[in-house]
Image: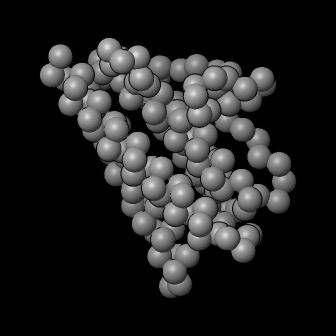
């Protein structure tokens, strides 16, 4: 395997860890926002859908069909696009993320822009940052 494939495998492993983390989160905490009014665990997960589409957009040969439950940066819905549909169902979020990820995997197999590794690294860093944030959030919410 090459460097790109190795790093994409890291991304797959990190994604699996986040999914396991989300599934282990107590259901009553998923939609609860902290006192700071930052995103809930579920909103963080919805944002990861949007971020994956954004980070891998250069791999797609056709325009990206944005997930409507993906939560854009800043949490502001985009007209007829990301954030226009809300859900409090973790399974819907995970199924949607799986669909988006399957599209990314298919695109990666066909297209490699010159800066392909940069896009994988960016998404990997972003995913890991949100995983840390979700862990801290769950600890705070569980302790309150």
Residue extending farthest to the left is 143
Residue 50 image-quadrant placement = top right
Above or below 104: residue 49: above
Q: Is residue 38 left or right of residue 108?
A: left
Residue extending farthest to the right is 62
Residue 67 image-quadrant placement = top right
In front here: 26 or 120? 120
In x, y percent, where is residue 71? 58, 30
Residue drawn at x 84%, y 53% is 62
In x, y percent, where is residue 82? 68, 30
- Specify whether residue 84 is in view: yes
Q: Is residue 27 left or right of residue 4?
A: left
Residue drawn at x 20%, y 30% is 139
Above or below 49: residue 17: below
In x, y percent, where is residue 29? 30, 21
Q: Is residue 138 left or right of residue 40?
A: left
Q: How many marks?
A: 0
In front here: 109 or 46? 46
In x, y percent, where is residue 59? 72, 62
- Specify whether residue 91 is in view: no
How does the figure colour the protein chain or chains? Answer: one colour
Residue drawn at x 50%, y 85% is 1
Q: Quadrant of the C terminus?
A: top left
Above or below 38: residue 129: below
Residue extending farthest to the front is 36
């Amino acid at each position: 395997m090459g460097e790109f494939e190795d790093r994409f495998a890291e991304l797959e492993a990190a994604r699996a860890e986040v999914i396991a983390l989300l599934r282990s989160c107590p259901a009553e905490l998923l939609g609860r926002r902290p006192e700071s009014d930052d995103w809930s665990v579920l909103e963080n997960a919805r944002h990861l859908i949007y971020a994956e589409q954004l980070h891998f957009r250069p791999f797609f040969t056709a325009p990206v069909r944005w997930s409507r439950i993906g939560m854009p940066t800043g949490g502001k819905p985009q007209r007829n696009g990301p954030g226009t549909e809300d859900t409090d169902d973790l399974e819907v979020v995970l199924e949607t993320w799986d669909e988006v990820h399957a599209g990314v995997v298919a695109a990666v197999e066909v297209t490699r822009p010159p800066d392909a590794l940069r896009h994988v690294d960016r998404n990997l860093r972003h995913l890991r940052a949100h995983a840390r944030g979700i862990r801290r959030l769950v600890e705070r919410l569980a302790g309150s």
